[in-house]
Amino acid sequence: MRTVGTVVRGIRAPIIREGDDLASIAAESVLAAAEAEGFKLRDRDVVAVTESVVARAEGNYATADDIAADVKAKFGSDTIGVIFPILSRNRFANCLVGIARGVKKIVLQLSFPADEVGNHLFDEDLLDDKGIDPWSTVMNEAQYRETFGNPVHPFTGVDYVEYYSSLIRSCGCEAEVIFSNHAETILDYTKFVLNCDIHTRARTKRRLLKAGAEKVLSLDDVLTAPVNGSGYNEKYGLLGSNKATEDTVKLFPRDCQTFVDALQKKLVDATGRNIEVLIYGDGAFKDPVGKIWELADPVVSPAHTPGLSGTPNELKLKYLADNDFAQLSGEALADAIRDSIKAKAANLVGNMASEGTTPRQLTDLIGSLCDLTSGSGDKGTPIVLIQGYFDNYSQDK
């Protein structure tokens, strides 16, 4: 009987630079790893490439001045509200510098006690200690300081209120900071709003416009086309961007489907196997200690080959063992479960034997696995190979 199920390997690759033929490099890296480590590629293996190197190979970069020019042109107002940004030096600081260079005053509205992805301004237990209802309370910076003092982020040691307001002022832009979890609060200060939330952005924009905003843009409306020859992303704009240098950002990659199709063809041509490919960004998982749930990219996977569409269709083995076949044990139990898997319906929605199998998108599950494997530091494995992900207990080979 087969003794190993899913195997995940981080694949090392050269350092990717702008203009590199990434599809060829990725294919060669996977094939070299297979030869060096003595494993064979099989049908329905998955090769995943991090969005970071895809964007780097594309040269999809922009400067703070590029952001400033686009913000200035699209708003046409000296004062704008910037609401619900995430608290991140890597993800938002350079974007904020660019925004500040494009206007004369920013009213910065922060959600509290945490941002959208779980970065905390302060310990949420302080809300109970202070008797504060976060859904009815609006504070200015003086009231915030009087109530909570000068708390810093537990991981970074940064006071993000001070950090963000200092960044704004360093650009010669006036900064006013307010705290509210209602988007509409900003309209008491300005009718021109840039909402910086990620996954709730469409709802926030709709609510602001309904409440009387004159102009509302989201981060996915900024740098949707080149500015002075800059990079851009027609679908996501600044969403998914990262700090590259002190004055530039790397944007989310653009021609993603073209890339995954090209890489798949190279792998199929080289191996004769039906290999799936996806690009992955942040995985969707929550850290139980820091309470950060990680997904700062607009999607886990911006592109994938067709075989990765859909959700898992799986039976819960422990349910079968404890219910349908509770009277069996040993090989008889194993055979009965294998037979159930082989005979399972194409759609198990509503079947109790599939309860708890988490019907999430395959690309979200696989992308999260890839992100955990490659990490965000110095592992040097921007490519991930997954084997056996689509196998099940009924398959012996």
Image (spheres, rainbow, N blue to C red):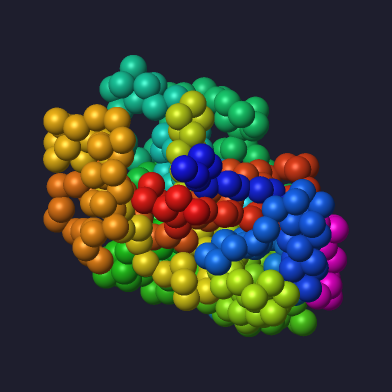
Picture residue at 14% right of the left edge, 40% below the top? 324
Q: Position of residue 213 (x, y in %)?
A: 36, 69
Q: Nearer the viewer, residue 96 or 154?
A: 154
Residue 72 visible here: no
- Answer above or below: position of 209 versus 164: below
Left or right: residue 12 versus residue 259 is: right
Q: Position of residue 268 (x, y in %)?
A: 65, 76
Q: Nearer the viewer, residue 312 or 204?
A: 312
Q: Residue furthest top?
A: 129
Q: Is residue 271 magenta?
A: no
Q: Nearer the viewer, residue 211 or 14?
A: 14
* Secondary structure, magenta segment, majority class: loop
Residue 72 in which image quadrant: bottom right
The number of numbered badges drawn on the structure is 0
- Answer above or below: position of 180 versus 241: above
Q: Position of residue 88 (x, y in %)?
A: 61, 45
Picture residue at 43% right of the left edge, 74% below the top? 215
Q: Nearer the viewer, residue 8 or 158?
A: 8
Q: Is residue 14 magenta?
A: yes
Picture residue at 39% right of the left edge, 21% below the top? 126
Residue 129 visible here: yes
Picture residue at 55% right of the left edge, 66% below the top? 43
Q: Over which residues does the magenta segment extend? A: 13-21
Q: Position of residue 130 (x, y in %)?
A: 34, 20
Left or right: residue 159 versus residue 309 is: right
